[in-house]
Image (tube, rainbow, N blue to C red):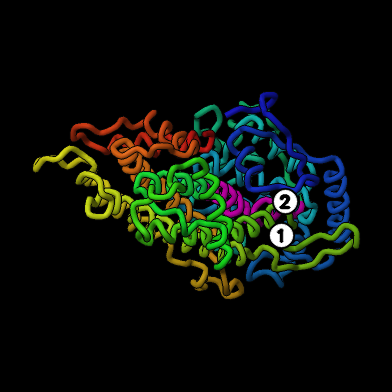
Amino acid sequence: MTHGSDVKRTILLGRDRLTVHDIRDVAQGEAGARLDPDAAARMDRAQAVLQEWLRADRPVYGLTRGLGNQAVATVPMAERARFSEDMLKARASGAGEPFDAVVVRAALLVRAATLAQAGAGARPAIVDTQLAMLDRNVVPYVPRVGSIGTSDLMLCANMGLPLVGLGRATYQGELLPGAEAMRRAGIPTLVLTEKEGLALCSSNAVSIGYGALVVAGVAELIDLADATLAMSLEAFGGNPSPFDARVAAAHPSPGQQQAAGRLRTLLEGSALFRPGVPRRVQDPISFRCATHVHGAALTALGWAKDAIEAELNCAADNPLILPDDDEILSTGNFHTGAMAIACDALRLALVPLGTTSAQRVAQLLNPEVSGLTNKLTRPGVTRSGLGLLALTAHTLNREARTCSVPVCNDDLTPFGVEDEAPFTLLSVRRAAEQVAFLQEVLACEMIVAAQALDLRPLEQSAPAVTKLQGFIRRHVPRLDDDRSTTEDIARLTEAIRSREASDM
């Protein structure tokens, strides 16, 4: 991870439209961010509106009035100065293991970016401090569990504590008290003004930041699934006619033409397009209908990406300050129902992607269908070859499928006024778990397809397939005698997760 002057590019918060890839690049230290001067000026104007309403003692949620069930109660004048820090401390709860540093960095960037929209009334100093923490890699301790999707209130409160010298944070690999982490990093802590405590914690930054990382990862997963499909089709001696542009145009289901076009590009130069090379008139559905499956996944991915990027570039604060109108309004903009539904749909769309991959493993290992040797090894009663990878892929896919159950249809919450919730973070977390399983499923298919191609090479492979074969062989040697394949799967999966495959 690179920081400070080593970053490759700088994103201007409050000016540039953010993408999921921007979030990932900053979270992984491959880019930096700073506050746009015009955005800082808008934040100052919003802060002035807030102070004007405070002096006039006008009713504002979280400023002159209480929170949650206390929204109609007036905050006593004597308590308003410390209300921000008190609410931040009180809401810093949650449980479970802490999020990885990259997830917290993504969340920290998201909150800085959304504060830069000037809807919260926070001072530019808040964003500058958050960006300094990103630049010097001060990572707050944020537990995994505690959000219901109507703001990641408790988790964002934990993330905000080090800014005021509280909580815990990791710096240079050591978990420290928040004040000590900030001191060692040379970042001054802040004294919050009115409403800034609410601004720090009333946000879905954890769900959105993590969601951006997951969606960027799903995009790479589908790319790899496409390339693996191309290699498996060559290894199987499959029939490419279902992916003909005319066939795809005859059934323009969402994403299907795009997926078929991607596969044709990957197969350019393959001998499969020559008469007599495909072994069968019609292949199993896991081959023949794969672009329909991948197309549906691409469609769901686009929906999730749009939902997350809308959240990245908006003011979702409650109450919302409108500096141009000198107005402060209560809102429901913290609700992330569209994002939760999109992430649920994405997980459902990834199920058949994993199923078809696992089924292709089984088909390639079945001599009656593949025309290859049993278990892709030399004949012999005692030989198992790669046979157990069919069971492994199937088991991994069952694990992935358990992650697909929708969560946004559970609206039970323990508080009377907060009586509906989309559970967005849970949907995102399950998507991350599902992707991890599917990476291992694809690793199994890649190992089997590479072995099959070694045993029955085409007269001419597509360059993209040859490149993928070389990537696999850098990590997993051809199997000539029985060996444990546990390490093979682990090594290849690690290479996938390190994004080595995406650099091919």
Residue 314, how many percent across, how many down?
Answer: 74, 56
State which quarter of the image contains the N terminus: top right
Q: Residue at x 39, y 34 (%)?
A: 472
**304 lies left or right of 464:** right
**46 lies left or right of 193:** right
Q: Is residue 7 above or below residue 402?
A: above
Residue 266, how many percent across, how many down?
Answer: 51, 44
Check disc 2 and report its element: helix, strand or loop: helix
Residue 22, how many percent across, how many down?
Answer: 66, 42
- Give the residue type that dot 2 points to: Thr
Q: Residue at x 61, y 61 (%)?
A: 303
Determine the image quadrant of residue 355: bottom left
Residue 124 visible in the displayed image: yes
- Taking the view exactly as shown, the residue that stands out farthest to the front is 275
- Taking the view exactly as shown, the residue that stands out farthest to the top is 5
Q: Is residue 495 above or below residue 204?
A: above
The Cα atoms of the two marked residues, 1 and 2, are separated by 8 Å
So how many labels did they put on this image? Answer: 2
Residue behind mark 2: 114
Q: Residues within 10 Å of mark 1 (few under 14, many from 20)?
A: many
Residue 382, how many percent across, how many down?
Answer: 10, 40
Q: Is residue 291 above or below residue 473?
A: below
Check disc 1 and report its element: helix, strand or loop: loop
Q: Residue at x 58, y 64 (%)?
A: 249
Residue 437 visible in the displayed image: no
**70 lies left or right of 442:** right
Which stretch did the figure color magenta?
194-219
- Give the residue type that dot 1 points to: Ala
Taking the magenta stretch, the answer to whether it contains residue 214 is: yes
Residue behind mark 1: 316
